[in-house]
Amino acid sequence: MKKHFQTILFGLAICFLLSSAAVSADPPISETSDVRYRRFHYGYHPMGRIYQRFLPAPRPKELYYSTELKAIANIDDTPEKETAVLMIVGANEASVPGNWEQAYLLITDTVAAGFSKKIDLFKLFDSGTYALEVPAKTVELRSPQFIFTQPPKDALKPPDVSFRLVDLTGDGTLDVWVEFGYAVAVISFQDGEFKEIFSSYTVPGMLPGPEYIDLDNDGSYEIKIPYSIYIEDLPGLPHLPWMSLYEWDGNAYVLSNERFYAENNDFLIELLSEYNYQLLQRGAFISYCETYRFYLGLLYYYRGSKSPSDLEWILEHAKNNDYIQAASVLLKKAPPLRR
């Protein structure tokens, strides 16, 4: 019991020290100019239907096509502008908003709409319910690194599907940031072709949704992916909020959580506060909660701690193989240097 109260006092002391430190606010996101957007408020708008000819025809009777949004801007290395179009495939014409089965991003040349040519087509999401033969590049959605659960596919179809054009990589060419359900993807013109350079599931929970933000004002944007982690060890516990930060290294978006957690004290304060509260409520049981111990150890690791006690505890006591393998890999590496 004495050890438990020492943990509580230590956590409170950390909270006091960290709360007194100044935490810099995120700089605002600047909107990209010279982009013309058009939202289609119903699926059968004549201008929107023009682009649906790139989907299978004739359209299956049990399905409907809907053009949601288009934007005109220069998104490749040519001087001419292109048109990006977001389309969905729904289960039937009477479906409620959000009951869509597939989502596509079409990129065409910008000429008279009836004669525009397809440059590329990406399948963003497919529930797997209907088989459509569509010659498209498939975006493979991923879970954030060190997140070992995915939301059910039925949770990936809220009514909101949208995109923005913004130069995320800082190379002077606009990229396509697409949000569809509990997922986000980035399509970029790289090495002479359009490619998916980032994709991820995201479950914000109580946190704000996914966002892009230039933390260091270097001209390229970092990506913040929030996730709400269900704690299986002790049912009834609040979901654990987690944030994954990715930065552009010139070739790909790579995980950079050590940067985020070294500069952000809020997650450490919240996790310690919740851990100590549960310790008071549940006693020693909380000490054996694998999820808490893993993410607490991960957070300290990202902050450059030389005392990996929680990750070592995972190796000795945990039953979850994902946690064990991740902790084993991390413990073989030196903690990241604080920037």
Image (tube, grey):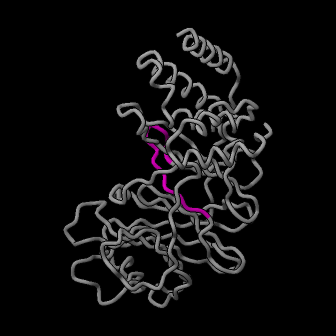
Q: Quadrant of residue 177?
A: bottom right
277, 141: nearer the viewer: 277
Q: Is residue 176 magenta?
A: no
Above/below status of 134 relative to 43? below
Kindly identify the residue that appears in the image at 36 percent across and 60 percent down: 153
Q: Position of residue 331 (x, y in %)?
A: 71, 42
Q: How many marks?
A: 0
**Residue with the most extreme top position:** 2
* Residue 303 horizontal side relative to residue 96, left or right: right
Kindly identify the residue that appears in the image at 29 percent across and 90 percent down: 58
Kindly identify the residue that appears in the image at 62 percent across and 19 percent down: 15
Q: Is residue 204 magenta?
A: yes
31, 4: nearer the viewer: 4
**Residue with the most extreme left position:** 94
Q: Mostly what secondary structure, the magenta segment?
A: loop
* Residue 337 horizontal side relative to residue 265, left or right: right
Kindly identify the residue that appears in the image at 41 percent across and 57 percent down: 181
Q: Quadrant of residue 238?
A: top left
**Residue with the most extreme front position:** 316
Q: Position of residue 77 (x, y in %)?
A: 71, 77
Q: Quadrant of residue 104?
A: bottom left
* Residue 93 horizontal side relative to residue 204, left or right: left
Above/below status of 56 relative to 38? below
Q: Quadrant of the C terminus?
A: top right
Q: Position of residue 115 (x, y in %)?
A: 48, 91
Q: Position of residue 173 (x, y in %)?
A: 69, 68
Q: Which residues are magenta?
A: 198-209
